[in-house]
Image (tube, grey):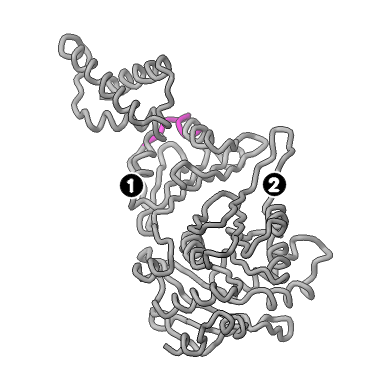
Amino acid sequence: MSQAIDHIQSEVRELIRRRGFDPVINPRSARELIDEVMNHYEERASTSSLPPLLNRPELARSVFDSVAGFGPLQRFLDDPEVEEIWVNQPGQVFVARNGLSELTTTMLAAGEIGDLVERMLKPSGRRLDVSSPFVDALLPDGSRLHAVIPDITRTHLSLNIRKFVVSAHSLDELVMRGSVTAHAARFLEAAITAGLNVIVAGGTQAGKTTMLNALINSIPATERVITCEEVFELKPRLPDVVAMQTRQPNLEGNGEIRLRRLIKEALRMRPSRIIVGEVRQEECLDLLIALNSGLPGMCSVHANSAREAVIKLCTLPLLAGENVTAAFVVPTVAASVDLIVQVGMDHTGSRTVREIVALPGRVENGVVETADIFTTRDGVLVRADGYPPHFDRFQRHGIDLAGLLAD
């Protein structure tokens, strides 16, 4: 079977080269060509020593994945149940389904991982080499690629592909999936309409991007939204959106565009809202300054609880320089951030909102005060006794906040 695959793949690649079409852009022609080559092969195999095709559909899929897809990994990319794919070494290909990881039987050749990554990076124009040993890029299907090469890794290239299999684009869809209660969803929608600043917090794979997408799509359609990300992951379904992503330096080390620069440039683009995909470093300072100027916005941050998210927001800006002090940052966080939406994933892989916490704007002994609006009790998100700040903004939009939270 292996000999037959090698023979057919070689012939298909040669014919693609001669006919001059791109199988990725024109997959239909690639499938027709594969069928043509396989028909010709079977005719010859019947009168020669060529091995027969024992499983033609499986072989056709393998050849197509090799010439027009991403080889042995393509079937995982096509599987809607697979959330993430990662490769530690040629003989270790893992996938995650419903938040649970499993080792697959897929085996890659020694140099195959590098070839696959090179093909994956080609559409984005990003590179992976000694001068840039890490790379983040977006695949054509919207999945996010992260790769690291030796000698940063010990021996083999490390590859992660994170897919976005959850198709929820609104709070209503998250309610239907059981990720958030209807009561909490109505409150969040009202908070977004009123222009509150919201931080989505959670761990890796907790559903931060999905929640952020749902919140973005609750923004009134009349507003102009500017998004800033390391790689494009957010998918706003709004009429007036400009999306920006960071850029790596070129081979001479020039031309890098960092997230801090994007946030600053976004302020010059007449935004009604600014959305930052995720803050991890000193760009948190620029976001806080933007939010403190009266511009509504949202972002996500890695944190295990809403309280830890507040602490992180008070810490990350200090990375911007020695002249940035906690005396400035802490009250700025209290005044700029209105809500923390904490999301998490349990042992079954279920992703839910764990708590919604408000920042009333007060600081006591260097600690930002918080108030629980919704909290989890016995595994259920329920109303707590806190209230969000800026009652006047809700009133301005005709929202009865007390009635909304009393449901």
**x, y (%) of residue 397?**
55, 79
Instruction: Report the residue at 39% width, 79% height from top.
Output: 379
Q: Label 2 neighbourhood size at 10 Å, few (<14), some (14-19), many (20+)?
A: some
Residue that lies at the very extreme toward the right in this rendered image? 323
Question: In the image, what residue occupies the spot 36% across and 47% down?
Answer: 103
Q: Quadrant of residue 45?
A: top left
Taking 148 as reference, is 406 left or right? left
Q: Which residues are magenta?
A: 107-114
Furthest residue in direction top, as rendered: 47
Predominant SS along the magenta part: loop
| 298, above or below 3, in the image | below
Q: Residue furthest left?
A: 46
87 left or right of 254 in image: left
The quarter of the picture where residue 241 lies is bottom right
Amino acid type shown at disc 2 = Ile
**Residue 113 falls within the magenta-colored stretch:** yes
Which quarter shows the C terminus?
A: bottom left
Which residue, given by chain and number where applicable, does mark 2 sit on? 257
- Residue 400 picture location, percent across and down: 50, 86
Tell which tag, 2 or 1, sits nearer the viewer.
Answer: 2
- What is the CA distance from the residue labelled 2 to the residue labelled 1? 34 Å
Q: Measured from the top left, where is residue 97 in percent x and y?
A: 35, 55
Residue in view at x 31 percent, y 28 percent: 31
Q: Which residue is mark 1?
A: 79
Residue 33, labelled with which disc? none
Q: Is residue 202 visible?
A: no
Label 1's element? loop
